[in-house]
Amino acid sequence: MKIAILGYGVVGSGAYEVLTSNGYDVKWVLDIRPHAELGDKLTSDYNDILNDSEVGVVAEAIGGLEPAHTFVVKALKAGKCVVSSNKHLICEYYDELNQLARENGVALRFTSSVGGGIPWLYNLKRSVRADEISKIMGIMNGTTNFILDAMISQGRDFDEVLKEAQSLGYAEANPSADIDGLDVARKTAISSSIAFNTIIKEENVSVFSLRNIKKSDIDYISEKLGKTVRYMGFGIKNANSASCFVEPVLLSSDALEANVNKNFNMISLFGKSLGRLSFYGQGAGKYPTGNALASDVCDIVNGDRALNKEYAPLDVDNSGCMRKYYIRTNVNLDSSLVCASEKIGDCYYIVTNSVSVADIHELAKSILESDPLAFFAGIEE
Amino acid sequence: MKIAILGYGVVGSGAYEVLTSNGYDVKWVLDIRPHAELGDKLTSDYNDILNDSEVGVVAEAIGGLEPAHTFVVKALKAGKCVVSSNKHLICEYYDELNQLARENGVALRFTSSVGGGIPWLYNLKRSVRADEISKIMGIMNGTTNFILDAMISQGRDFDEVLKEAQSLGYAEANPSADIDGLDVARKTAISSSIAFNTIIKEENVSVFSLRNIKKSDIDYISEKLGKTVRYMGFGIKNANSASCFVEPVLLSSDALEANVNKNFNMISLFGKSLGRLSFYGQGAGKYPTGNALASDVCDIVNGDRALNKEYAPLDVDNSGCMRKYYIRTNVNLDSSLVCASEKIGDCYYIVTNSVSVADIHELAKSILESDPLAFFAGIEE
């Protein structure tokens, strides 16, 4: 079986190197830019791939919705297996692509869309076959972890570290998808969908941005509360619903995630028989993500064409999920919510009583209207 | 395809529950003890399984060498796929069983033989297909990790914690295989064999026992050296050989392994394109290990019958692998080896200069002749 790679950017070229250096037969690479090293393998006409009956698997590494979506749909309809690293595409068209793959009897894999080089989704899917998953959670974004680690270990402030992350290529010129949580929300939605055998949409994941964290928060959390901070996604299975949210989180220093540094990721599942299983590694980058994309391709080339499971609808409902929160704001909050509060300068540094995730995210909207710089973080017990 | 489970002890009964509660068809369970709940599925005659053409996969959870070895050989020769959780069997008969499986065109899987519920070997094998593994390492034994964690967090001494571990069922009445390192040596041998595509025998893995660690070591390591201790196996790929050893190891408090507590395991691979990938979870227990055994069965039932790769011989050579060591002994060592030394009571607490793993394990033998209570630990930089 021969392979076609769509897109020869960071991930596509990484996957190309991994596959060809390990003896796999990449026949075509689709890209509109010239790449002399690819010789005759390079094409800018997708029909070369679509009409080539030797190509059994198409690896999509273009990113974004179009033309990736059109190309993937055509590949599935042509009876070719598809592998993708594109979380935006998978999140937006989860249902359509899974249905198309099943109808055409071909495999659809997207391990590298969450957790970069970590075989997280692959193992999550493998675990779901013989276990009941009650919860998934993790550090799923390298950019925000790099920023938090640098703020904590070097005592620097958010804006300065963000600029460094941008200059190192860890953060985009427009960093919103990372620091405002859309990236983690998508990864949480895809992970929860697989864990709970359903479809969860990114817009149903409640998100607290990391953007407002300041050095004064890091100092207060460390010195007064004895905790550290990470930015994490959570999916929790309830009796008849799921709770899904993305938040900065206060952790004890001996939590495994508290020692996940630099741009690394750690993602965990909690199974009825497996207990906790955690996966740690590079959440992004040319070779790790390229390797993860290539590994999905290898599975298919080596004969694993299993179809994805059928799934059932499940509501997202954050009203039953109770946590304590850390809030830093200049708004004087209703005392029934406040467990402990300290005023330093203009700001209240607050630890709340236990409150539902739904309620705190609703309340945060109104607080942010008066105090757009307020910061919110869940507290892991 | 129907399933037979050999042995209805802790792991076998766990796998039985996991498989049957998830809709898999276990037709036979082999055990010599009565188990009313198994009804007609129970047999004490292996021929019932061997001669049943509906049984396509045999899951061995008897443990030990015989009769497990005889049963597995017969299953492979009868063209049945085999799954085993038995590290002793796999380590001893690695070559014979792999050859037999290939000759008979059947799958042989043993994920649950290392790391209990952690899909470590499964992912290691998957990674090897498309990456070059330079090193594996990990906390692979829950008993010794439980002992170390309790000694460190509760300030207790080895013998007392070992007795507690025995009373909780975490340690055997004869704890030697755990605390003297044979268990980790076998897991290191199997992991290194897969990582480096070869056969490494347990007798070629150099081992420092954990048995001699005392509260005074924990205190010195923490207070004077600012480190913590874990018991770990290592496999490192050299140009034309591999270094394989099992040692107590001094770690910085921010190392991921330093925060692996209780009886949990964490095992890592280092790949050329993947970088570091780590897997954390329950390294033993009825349901985690039963689930891992069941998951290998599920792969086969779902159609993954890939044969194991061919492999090539590779010498074990620890002479090129340089590390510093912590030694506590009443023997006054050659000063050329010693970087720092402090005498407290009768004992020297020593940090060595960089020395080869081969040399220190050789030297340790002679030190232990004069001081049978001496303690040795590698230092991770």
Image (tube, coloured by chain):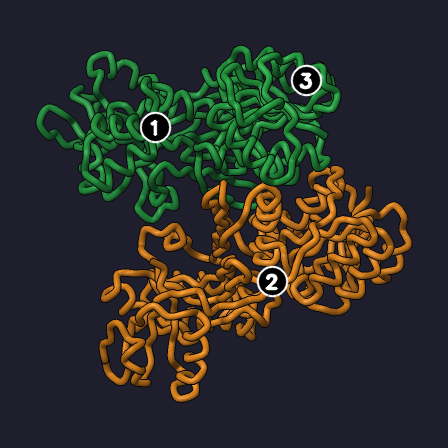
Chain colours: A orange, B green
Tally the numbered discs.
Answer: 3
Query: What distance separates the C-alpha of mark 1 from that of mark 2?
Result: 40 Å
Within-10-Å neighbours for mark 1: few <14, some 14–19, many 20+: few
The answer, for residue B5, to whether it is visible in the render is yes
Query: What distance separates the C-alpha of mark 3 from that of mark 2?
Result: 44 Å
Q: Nearer the viewer, residue B272 or B229?
A: B229
- Residue marked by disc 2: A314
Percent across and percent down for residue B291 are: 54, 36
- Residue marked by disc 3: B76
Please tell me whether residue B39 is drawn above or below residue B126 in the rendered image. above
Of all chains, the one bearing label 2 is A
Percent across and percent down for residue B15 are: 55, 31
**Residue at the extreme left of the image, as rendered:** B345
- What is the number of the mark on residue B169? 1
Q: Residue at image x 23%, y 44%?
A: B226
Q: Residue at image x 34%, y 17%?
A: B362
